[in-house]
Amino acid sequence: MTTQDNLVLSTPSPTEGLPAFRDWSRRMRDEHPVHFDEARNAWQLFRYDDVMRAHQDHNVFSSRLDKVMPEIGDLGRGSIVIMDPPQHRKVRTLVSQAFTPRTVRGLAPRITEITEELLSAVVDRDRFDLVSDLTYPLPVTVISELLGLPVEDREFFRRSIDARLSRDFVRVEDALTDEELIASMEEANSYMLDHVRVLRRQPGEGLISKLITAEVDGEKLDDVEIVNFANLLFAAGHITTTMLLGNTMLSLDEHPAAAVELRADPDLIPSALEEVLRTRTPVSMTFRATATDVDLHGRTIPANSLVALWLFAANHDERQFGEPDTFDIRRDPNPHLGFGQGIHFCLGAPLARLESKIALEILLRRFPELRVLRDEVEIYPNTRIIGTRRLPVAPR
Ligand code: HEM
């Protein structure tokens, strides 16, 4: 394949709009289902069946990304997403014990309270930024309380996360240099380490304290492992839900009839959220490392290659979904891959679903009309995620 081909096939930025992204992913599914992306130095898979299989076959598609990206180094130690069995199972069992369906259900009254409080602060305004005023503070408050971190620090968290999300690891127009990115991650690590040390001396109720005292096969997790795990839970535990809620607002603004239906029948909210996860997949891709050569659609992905599994593209595959570009809040079944699949299936999916459902119910009830000020919306310029950084809205 020529360099020219590679340019034509290079991923559009989500800032170019959803149709461009959908068209590109259709072309890749049809013409280049197994593609080597020189810029990313990674193979890419696009079709639903291939992406599904790669998530399920963890012996061939390993999560040990540190083996193909040694630069991950200590930053990845203890991070469940880059573990394979048997270590993965042990750690997942341990966190799952602290993060039971009962714990999640028990959070409903607090989620309702936070949402009502946040919306009371903006209800009389002509316009507000849905991200700063609701979709960011709600999940960050919930996950901070769950982990046992001081909620007052949320502006620090936001700066740190925002800096990292504004950068795609291949795009030349990235805002952040390597040094700045590393500095931002180190800042987040040292913040978390300070808290882990405090909680070691004085354990509290939160999940971090449980991780400190928990044992995996008779061994406790060390500080680096706890810090990395807490960072992952913290980041994965809020910004993704921020994206889902913002993406929902955008989708409803584009499909006003769906918004009317949801206001009339809030029982449809859960299935509408699943359709947003499918059509505006917040985590647009996951990564794996091949443990062996893989022959697929006439190409061979060599062992020890980095592979990007395109959840967004799989979620629009016409081989799996009827009329994949149609936003259908009643789609049933809707086996989208927005939360991944297999042993790494999102641990926080029940929490994300609960938070988003409660927030959307209250938002739609308290604002009988809400218009997105489309010219002012800011989309993250990062192909790995689909979401808004700023989402100005006006009650009509
Ligand atoms: C894993 C998406 C919310 C914690 C994943 C994966 C995806 C995902 C695609 C699979 C990663 C892979 O296979 O490599 C999302 C989306 C969310 C969301 C779209 C919101 C709409 C949350 C929340 C939490 C969370 C609220 C925590 C409270 C995790 C963790 C993993 C994970 C710990 C790793 C699980 C493992 O490796 O076994 N998530 N997530 N996520 N998610 Fe989420």
Image: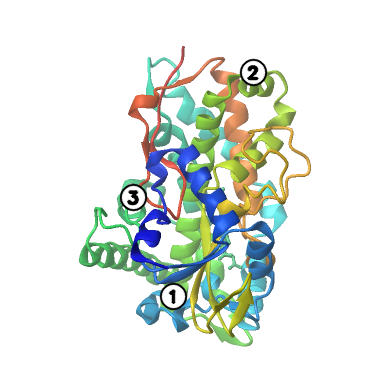
Compared with 57, 185 (above or below) is: above
Residue at x-position 53% and y-position 25%:
254
Do the CB atoms of the residues marked 2 and 1 lie less than 8 Å apart?
no
User: What residue is pinned by disc 3?
Assistant: 162
Alpha carbon of mark 2 to alpha carbon of mark 3: how far?
Answer: 33 Å
Query: In this orientation, which residue lies closer to the viewer: 276 or 295?
Result: 295
Can you name the residue that lies furthest to the right here?
A: 333
Of callouts 2 and 1, the N-terminal one: 1
Q: Mark 2: which amino acid?
A: Val
User: What residue is pinned by disc 2?
Assistant: 260
Compared with 141, 308 (above or below) is: below
Position in image of residue 190 (x %, y %): 31, 68
- Frontmost of labels 2 and 1 is 2
- Would you say residue 373 is visible in this rendering? yes
Of callouts 2 and 3, the N-terminal one: 3
Displayed quadrant of residue 77: bottom left
Ligand 1 positioned in quadrant: bottom right
